């Protein structure tokens, strides 16, 4: 198993420092939060992108994916969503990242309508993804919190360049058992986002193993040649303990679950 963490846990941190942290704590990859408030985002020009690639190469760390905020099921005009998807795909390709993470964002639409919108947009973007050799992964989140929700959309697209990210917390909080989530998403899975929290009703981030989320049940279902990415959502919970001091212990905890 290979281990990564998301820069959501170290908001605004310089790329060189992110790479250094990953190497020191034994992580092979990093998921880059591609938001304009972060150092890496689709607005970077060519030489800035090359600098990011060089920093990761020098540290021997991979860019696992670009975590974008395109909401593929959102109501409104397709063109704005397409433009965001294309910019994310080109950023990932320039950084050598195999994946782009997107969100559903279906809001209060009827389920069938939101599914159809997401499938249409992802299907169109899949052709560009194929050309760039980048895979688009839909995360189970917000309007599509369960594996069943995401599997419906990805199956409707029916394209190998469109898959899924399994966020273990969202599916668990939605009441879906890990075995069911994994069974539904396994044919489409790119990587797995792990996290921990105090309870189903409290998503405040805590160190891995310190909360109530059944990480052992989730990790025990996975192939051993995949990626586990720790998404510690400190960006939304600034009072949570800083991630850098937790990274090494978190990786050791995950390695113990994998070995067990």
Image (tube, grey):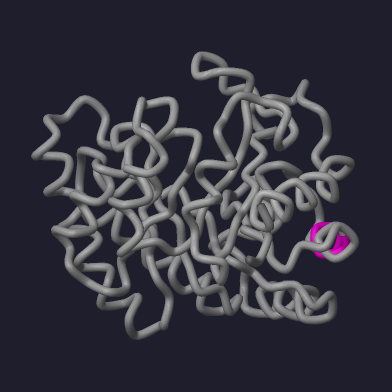
Q: Please state the horizontal and vertical placement of residue 30, each as a whole percent of the image.
A: 68, 61
Given residues 23 and 43, the one toward you in this image is 23
Given residues 146 and 32, the one toward you in this image is 146
Residue found at the very far bottom of the displayed protein: 131
In percent of the image, x 21 and y 38: which residue is there?
Answer: 75
Residue found at the very far front of the displayed protein: 260
Q: Please state the horizontal and vertical placement of residue 43, each as a whole percent of the image.
A: 57, 62
- Residue range (magenta): 16-20
Q: Please state the horizontal and vertical placement of residue 134, each as a whole percent of the image.
A: 43, 75
Residue found at the very far top of the displayed protein: 201
Tell me if residue 160 comes above or below residue 221 in the rendering: below
Residue 83 included in the magenta stretch of the image: no
Tell me if residue 98 comes above or below residue 165 in the rendering: below
| Callout count | 0
Q: Quadrant of the N terminus?
A: bottom right
The image quarter containing residue 3 is bottom right
In percent of the image, x 82 and y 28: which residue is there?
Answer: 241
Tell me if residue 113 comes above or below residue 238 in the rendering: below
Chief secondary structure of the magenta span? helix
In this picture, residue 259 sits left or right of residue 246: left
The image quarter containing residue 8 is top right
In percent of the image, x 55 and y 34: which residue is there?
Answer: 214
In this picture, residue 103 sits left or right of residue 41: left
In percent of the image, x 82 and y 63: which residue is there?
Answer: 26
Q: Please state the horizontal and vertical placement of residue 137, each as a whole percent of the image.
A: 39, 59
């Amino acid at each position: 198993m290979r281990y990564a963490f998301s820069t959501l846990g170290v908001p605004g941190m310089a790329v060189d420092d992110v790479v250094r942290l990953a190497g020191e704590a034994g992580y092979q990859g990093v998921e880059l939060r591609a938001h304009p408030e972060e150092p890496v985002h689709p607005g970077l020009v060519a030489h800035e992108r090359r600098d990011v690639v060089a920093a990761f190469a020098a540290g021997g760390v991979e860019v696992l994916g670009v975590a974008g905020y395109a909401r593929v099921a959102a109501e409104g005009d397709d063109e704005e969503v397409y433009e965001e998807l294309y910019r994310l795909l080109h950023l990932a390709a320039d950084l050598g990242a195999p994946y782009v993470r997107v969100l559903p964002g279906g809001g209060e639409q009827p389920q069938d309508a939101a599914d159809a919108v997401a499938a249409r947009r992802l299907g169109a973007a899949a052709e560009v993804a194929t050309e760039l050799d980048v895979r688009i992964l839909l995360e189970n989140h917000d309007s599509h919190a369960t594996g069943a929700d995401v599997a419906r959309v990805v199956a409707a697209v029916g394209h190998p360049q469109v898959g899924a990210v399994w966020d273990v917390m969202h599916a668990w909080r939605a009441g879906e058992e890990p075995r069911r989530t994994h069974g539904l998403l396994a044919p489409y899975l790119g990587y797995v986002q792990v996290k921990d929290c105090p309870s189903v009703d409290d998503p405040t981030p805590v160190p891995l193993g310190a909360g109530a989320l059944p990480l052992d049940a989730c990790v025990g279902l996975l192939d051993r040649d995949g990626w586990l990415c720790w998404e510690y959502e400190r960006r939304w919970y600034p009072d949570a303990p800083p991630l850098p001091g937790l990274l090494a212990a978190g990786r050791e905890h995950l390695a113990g679950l994998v070995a067990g």
